[in-house]
Structure formats: C-alpha cells, structure tokens
Image: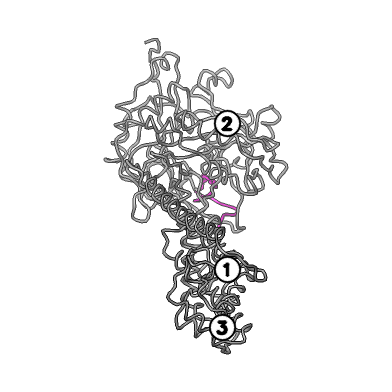
Amino acid sequence: MEQAAFYLLKSAAWLTGFTLLYLLFLRKERFFMLKRIYLLSGLVLSLLLPLVTLHYRIELPAPLVQETQGMNTIQPSSTEAVAEIVEKSDPLKWFMIFYAAGILFLLGRTLQYLFSVYRTVRHGQINREGDALLVRTEKYTSAFSFFNYVFINPSLSGREVREILNHEMVHLRQKHWFDLLLIEIMSLIQWMNPFAWICSALVRQNHEHLADEEALQRTSDPAGYRAALLNQVFSARLITLSNSFNFSFNTNRFEMMKKKNYSPYRKLKLLFVLPVAAAILYAFASPKYVSPDPVTPFELTIMQAEAVTQVPVRGVVYREDETPFPGVSVNVSGTTLMTITGPDGRFEFRSIPENVILLFTHKGYKYLPIKPQYDKEMSVKMIPDPDYVDPATIQPDPARKRPVVVVDGVVTDETEGAVMQRMRDDLGAFNSLKPEEAVKKYGDRAASGAVEYWSVKKAKELGMKVPLRRKSENDFPTFEGNSYLAFNEWVISRTVYPGEAVRLGVSGWARVSYTVDNDGNVTDIKPTTGTNSILGNALAEVIRTSPRWTPPLNPEMNEPFTSEVVARFTLPDKVKVAETFVVVEEMPKFPGGDQALFNHLYENLKYPPEAKTQGIQGKVILRFVITAEGKVADVTIVRGVHPLLDQEAIRVMNTVPDWIPGKQGGRTVDVYYSVPISFALKEGTDTSK
C-alpha cells in the first residue's frame, strides 16, 4: 500500500512537471504535431518513470570494535537512521480507500456516457462518409467525433456539415482517439491531481489546432469554416473521450488559424524538459548503502581490506610525557583496516582510501580522530581520559600473570599485540587455552594459560580451516549484477508484515543468516539467536525465493559465503532496512558515565549456578543499538562463551536504563554499540554450590 501511494506521488510529480513546462513555454507555439508528441510522451513517461529510481552510493563503515574504558565501543558511521514511528491508526489506508472510491465514481460516470453514445449509435441514422460513419441525431446539439463516428445534429445546413466533416476527418486520420484514451486513463489514475485535468484540456486543445490547421488547407471556403465554428459556440461537448468541433473556442483558436512564420529555433524550448526531468529524478533518488562484510572484533584486528589509493601513511604515537606509546589501536574509518603501534610507537599503512579518518584508541585515553597526513610522517599525542574507570576497581580480580604466547608451536616472549601486528597479513588461526590445558601442553610456565597463533601455511599443514579474507568486490559473489548488499533491500522490499505478528503486537529487529554455495544457490537459511520466530520466518520465506547468485570473479574465493539480512519491523505494517549509524557526531552516553554503567551491570549480573558448577567463564561481547529514543534494542551476541553465560549477558543488558541518545546533524539517531561482559570465577571458588 505504501509503495502504491509513493508511485502515485511520483507519477503526479512527473505529470505536473511536464504540464507546467508546456504551460510556460509551449502553449502558444505553432508546431502542433511536435507539441502532440511532447504531450503524449509526457503522459507515457509519467506512468513509466515513477518505476525508475536513481540511487546515490553511501558507503557504510564496518562496525569497528574499540576496547576502551572497560567496554568495546563501536565508533561512528555516516548514514542516517530511520526513526521508529509507531502508528495507532493508519491514515494511508483510509486515503487509499478514498482514492479508490474516486476512481470507481469517475469510471462509472465514463461508462454511463459511453452507454449513452452506444444507444445513440444503435438508434440513430448512420451514413458512411469515406472512412467516417456519420450519425445524425437530435440528442446532441454540438458536433463531435468518437473513434470513427461523427455525430451531427440534423438541423445543420449542408455547408456546415461539409466543414464539420472536413474538420472531424482530421481527428480520424491522425487517430486522436488514442491520445484521448491515454489521457482518460491518466485522469482516472491521477484524479486528485489538478494538473491531470489541465493536461487533458491541453491535449484536446492541441487536437483542435491540428484539425484546424489541416482543415483550413483542405477547405475552399475558410470563411465558411470559421462561420460553422461560430455556430457551434454555445453547444456543449459530450464526453471526455470525444473530439468536439467547438472545443477550445476562444480568440486564441482563431489566432492560431492565421498563417505566420516563426523561427525553427523556438522548438529548442523542448530542451527545457531535461533540467525538469533531472530535478525530479534527483528529488526522488534514494541512497544505496554499501558496507563491508560484518566481521568479529578479532577479525578487525587481523584483517586488512583492499586499499583504494597507493599513498602510504606512517607516524609515531606518543604518551603525554613524549615517550613512544606501543599497543595503540589505529583504525581507518569506513574500512576494516586496523593496525597496532609497535614497541617504538610507530604505525604504518601501506595504502589507504582517501577522505578517511584515523581513529586512535587505548584504554585510559581519550578517543582521538585525526585526518591522515600523506606528505609527511605523522606525530600523534594521546590524551589521558580523566573519567576512565578501570573495571578492576569495580570488581577486583586476583593478580594474574600474562598467558604465554605461542607462534607456530614455539613459545615466544612477544606480547599478543606484537604478534598480531607482525602476523596481521599471515594469521591463519588462533586459540586460547585454559590454564589446565596450557600446563599439560607447555608446562608450568603456562600456569596462567596460553594463546596459540598459527601462520596461514602452518594452519593449513595442520589441517586447520583458514578463514577466507575477502578484500575486494571481486572476492564476493554478486546478486543480480550488484553487490551482495543489494540482496538485503531485495528481500525487505518483498517481505510482508506477518498478520500473526500484528495480532500479537510483535515488532523490532529481525536477523536471518544465509549461505551462498559455490553454485550460487542460497542455503542454510535460519533466523539468528534472539530474533522473533514469526518475524524471522517472514524474512526466511522471501530469502528462499532468491534467484541464483553469480560466483566471485576471483576463482580462489569461490567458497561458501555467509551473510545475513537485517530488517526492522514497525507496527502496524512497515518493514524497513535496519539502517543504523556506526559513528555519529555525538555518541550515545549512559547517564552518570561509565562508572554508573559498570555499577548497574555488576549489581544486576547473576552468575548462572550451572555455569558456576561447570567452571564456565569467559568474556561475552554484545552488540546492540541505542535507539533515537535512548532505548537499548536488538541485543545480539558478537562473540559468545556458552549459552548459559550468553543468555545472562543479554538479560542484564536488556535491564539497562535509557541512555542519552547519539546525535547526527543535530537530531537523535539509532547507533550501534558494543560492550564486553566478563564472567570470571575467583581462584578457590567452590563450584559445587
């Protein structure tokens, strides 16, 4: 219903534009046949062009997980969010009912007139005059033509009949009935648009000018022709589908009958239609959001996307005391590019896109966005955050030694950050070992656990599954010639709000994952954890109807590709693309700051007894949306530990009070956010209770 109303709005805009252009620049011009072509083209295009929508590209950055102040904060994006609007009534429904009633009324009136003409033809006196059928009837005082019938009152003289036939035969030869049929259809579709009726009158007026022009060339008595026209002046035409001899009787019509020379360059006025069309296309253009494949926090650390330019960027990060600062995360906005400063505080990107921002983050320091400098080495000074709260001060844990780091089976003295920095382009797999497992494998030195890293080559030798790192568009399968991101819009445009969900008052976000196999078939379609089954199944049904995809142009990447469709269901019947900001000018804030957020989480967190008994612990990373109203919504698991801990983390996050929403361009918007919740058992904890 919403799409139909939007189509009518766009169609009305196109017809209004074409009609206004005619009224302003073409109405008094004398190239009648060219004007007829213009009017007909305007009618046809007003029906077809609303089906065409231009798209302008907006690139969305991938959610970049930045661990600061004890929580992972997803940084800003450049796209607008669609605020949720819950309607108690549906005015659009009543508008469409009123609109349909108007069409039925006008259609009934037209059919009534047609039936009246049909009865007249059946009972009238009919004579053939060339290609025309002359119907003499006293029912109509005004002469008019209807398809190949010409209706004339018997009281007219022979001279008047001859001149009228001379005129009406032009209508028949030039098949003006086709124009009238088209404008009648348009008038029914756009009966609420006054310019539809104005355009209808302009089409008929131009028909009369065309007929006058040719009839005057064929008649031997121009004065008698004008006299016959005057005799019909006070008669009324019958129906909209007819050409009346006296239509558009005014001084302008007689003026148009005069032979005048005019410059052929006046026809160039038709070119004014180009800026009008461009303006309307631009007014109804819609954004096409393009973003990289969602990745996990760990993938953001080890992955590097295909660069757009070949300009390197390098620099040094310093602490407040001017000493080199190692371990600082440097993200490139809008991409999955990330690096970590080395022991000397240095960072380097071999090539990055233009018009991006470098995001410098570290625990205990303020988030620092800086434009990259391509022509010289950058010098960046981090600023301590006086409001930073160490989570350990809220829930102190026993002091623990750093887990050992193992690279390709060899224990190293390098830190995890240094290994990830060194192996960012060659990391095939990694694994974290609990202390008991680490001790069995690496001895007492691994009493605090171990983290194992394998290069791509070593991981493949050991038979490990190395994840594909798709870096360019050629590495992804395509959907109907477009990026895989277009599939999201394709699915949502065909999804109908489930009636059961409306009855139960169910709304919110829905996520359905799917896999494109090597042959381009969509398989393994299933709603993700936390998605309402009714909403998820509605999306899944549409996904199952997907046409076959085209494999990646890079044959090395022709492996199963997994992604998800995300939609937002808003009562009573709206299904929208879940467009949410990642970075905004003013990020969401929890009232009272991080200290208050930590207090709320730890005060309300309940360690699941069964998980405690089994000794299950670890860090659960949640992703959620802070809505434009400040609500926490769409809480999902980015990295889980165990269903018991995962569900408890989701539960406690859903208890968080309202936030101060994020703002972009001065208005509140939906913003992605991410927070880790750690479940840790203190040493010596009795897990049997």
Q: Which residue is mark 2?
A: 525
Q: Is any atom of residue 179 visible in this view?
A: yes
- Compared with 44, 554 (above or below) is above
**Element class at badge 1:** strand
Residue range highlighted in magenta: 332-353
Question: What's the CA distance linking mark 2 and mark 3?
Answer: 61 Å
Ranked by sequence position, the earlier of labels 3 and 1 is 1
The label on residue 150 is 1
- Which quarter of the picture shows residue 176? bottom right
In the displayed structure image, the side of residue 351 where residue 572 appears, left or right: left
Report the amino acid beneath label 1. Val
Q: Which residue is mark 3?
A: 266
The label on residue 536 is none
Badge 1: residue crowd in 10 Å (few <14, some 14–19, many ≥20): many
Predominant secondary structure in magenta? Answer: loop
Q: Give x and y (percent) for residue 411.
A: 59, 29
Q: Nearer the viewer, residue 145 or 297?
A: 145
In the displayed structure image, the side of residue 683 where residue 44 appears, left or right: right
**Element class at badge 2:** strand
Badge 3: residue crowd in 10 Å (few <14, some 14–19, many ≥20): few
Mark 1–mark 2 CB contact (< 8 Å): no
**Element class at badge 3:** helix
Question: What's the CA distance linking mark 1 and mark 2?
Answer: 65 Å
Q: Is 40 colored magenta in this rendering?
A: no
Report the amino acid beneath label 3. Arg
- Compared with 194, 23 (above or below) is below
Q: Nearer the viewer, residue 619 or 335?
A: 335
Report the amino acid beneath label 2. Ile
